[in-house]
Amino acid sequence: MKVLVINCGSSSLKYQILDMTNESLLCKGLVERIGMDGSVITHEKIGMDKVKKEVPMKDHKDAIEQVLAAVQDKEHGVVKSMDEIGAVGHRVVHAGEKFAKSVLLTDDVKKALEECIDLAPLHNPPNLLGIEACRELMPKTPMVCVFDTAFHQTMPPESYIYAIPYEYYEKHGIRRYGFHGTSHKYVAERASKMLNTSLDDLKLITCHLGNGASVSAIKRGKCIDTSMGFTPLEGLVMGTRSGDIDPAIVTYIREKENLPQGKANEILNKKSGVLGISGVSSDFRDLEEAVAEGNERAALALKVFAHKVRFYIGAYIAEMNGVDAIIFTAGVGENDVSMREIICDNLGNLGIKLDPVKNKVRGKETIISADDARVKLLLIPTNEELMIARDTFNIVTGKAI
C-alpha cells in the first residue's frame, strides 16, 4: 500500500508518499505561500532533481490539487492515478483529551477536532483545511488523523494537572498536553530495536532538540511526563520560546514596558529563547559561530539551553527511579556534536558517560555512550512522516497500534 502523508500549516503544506511494503520514501515536497502572491510547489521524486513550479494557489484545496498533479506527473510522479494511494495520513497538532492514539477520520472525529480549535488556534484550523480539501478531492480514500498530543495522553494526573483552581481544568481544559508526540514515539520504538529490548522493559528519556524542543519520560512504552505543557511554550529554552519562567514576569514586563494586549505572548513565543539571550540568532549554528568569535551572550545562550535539558533529564531519572537510555533527536539533537557534549558532561554519578569519539557523528542512528556507561546514549534521527504513515497503514489494514 502507498500512503500519502500531509502536514498542513497556515500558508504551507509538506507531503510525502511512502510505499508501506518496505517503508520506502517515493517522493516528498513542499507547498509555500498558500493564499499569497508567489505561491510555489517544490516536488522531489527520490533519485531525481527537485522540480519547482510557481502557480497561483488561493487556498488549501488548490494546494492539494497541485500536490496530486505533481505525484501523478508522467516524468516526476510516483503513481499513475490516485487509485494507487491506499490511504492518507494527516498530522494534527491538538486532540485535547479526546484521542489517546491515531484514529480513522470520520465526521465525528472531524467535529471533535473542531472543538479543540481553542486549544491550538494557530495549528488546528490549517490541519482541518487540509483534511477537508483531501476529503473533497479523494472522497473514497480512507484517511487517518495522527496527533502530536496523543502519545502523551498516558501521563498520570500528577504529571498533567497545574496547581491552579481545578475548575479551570474542568471548564477550559487547562492542563499539560505535551507536543512532538509522534517524534517521541518514533525514537522510543527505534531505541527498543537498537537495544534489542522490549519497550515494556525500558525506561527512556527522549530529547527532541530543535528550534522547538521537548523532553519526555517514557516508562514501559508509556509517556509518564513531558516538558511542554498547555502550549508548546513551556519547558526547555528553545530557539525563540522562553520555556519555563516565573509567570509573574509576564504581568511585570507588561506594566514596565506598557505593552498592548497580546504583545507579551508574542515576545515569549517569538523573541525569547536563545535568540532573546544572545541577540544574535535562533539558529544554533549561528550561535556557535558567534561563540568562536568571542560573543559571550551567545555562549551564555547555549549554556542556558543545555542547563535546562540537564535539569529535565535529572528530574525524569528521579521520576522513573532510573533510566536505561537517553535519546537525542531533531535538528540540534541529531547534528550538534558540542551541544550533546555539554549536556552529558559530568553526569557520571548518574551512569551517563559520552564517548567523545563515537559522538563525532551527525544525523546517523548510532550509540554514542562509552562502552562502560550504565546508561546508553543513542542518536536517532526522527522520522515523524514515517510514524504517521505507519499508524495510517496499521489503522486502515486493521492492525493494532
Image (cartoon, grey):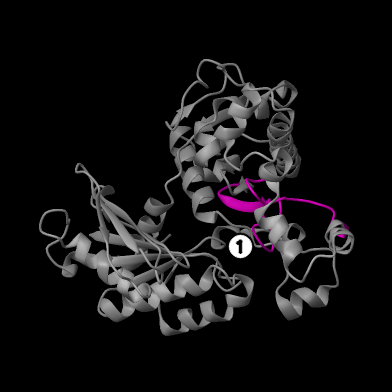
Instruction: Please indicate whether residue 51 sits to the left or right of residue 99 in the image.
Output: left
Q: Position of residue 141 (x, y in %)?
A: 27, 74
**Residue 261: x and y, percent?**
76, 71
Q: Amino acid at mark 1?
A: Gln
Mark 1 residue crowding within 10 angstroms, few (<14) / some (14–19) / many (20+):
many
Q: Where does the N terminus fall, quadrant-wise?
A: bottom left
Q: Check the image and report above or below for 316 versus 85.
A: above
Quarter holding the C terminus is bottom left
Please identify the dominant SS of the magenta region. loop
* Residue 392 x/y as whole percent: 36, 63
Left/right of residue 227 with respect to residue 100 in the rendered view? right
Dot 1 corresponds to which residue?
153
Q: How many marks?
A: 1
Quadrant in the picture for residue 30 = bottom left
Residue 176 vs 208, above or below: the answer is below
Q: Is residue 233 visible?
A: no
Q: Residue at x 57, y 18 (%)?
A: 355
Q: Nearer the viewer, residue 41 or 343?
A: 41
State the image coordinates of residue 72 (x, y, percent, origin top left): 16, 63
Residue 213 part of the magenta segment: no
Height in image: 174 above or below 209? below
Q: Is residue 70 above or below residue 286?
A: below
Apparent side of residue 215 relative to residue 142 in the rendered image (left or right): right
- Answer yes or no: is residue 203 visible: yes
Per the image, label 1 sits on a secondary structure element best described as: helix
- The residue at the point 72 percent across, 24 percent down is 347
- Name the residue located 75 percent from the left edge and 81 percent from the top edge: 171
User: Start and end of the magenta stretch?
Assistant: 219-248
Q: In the image, what residue occupies the spot 54% across and 70% down?
A: 99
Residue 243 part of the magenta-drawn span? yes
Query: Observer-nearest residue: 349 or 55?
Result: 55
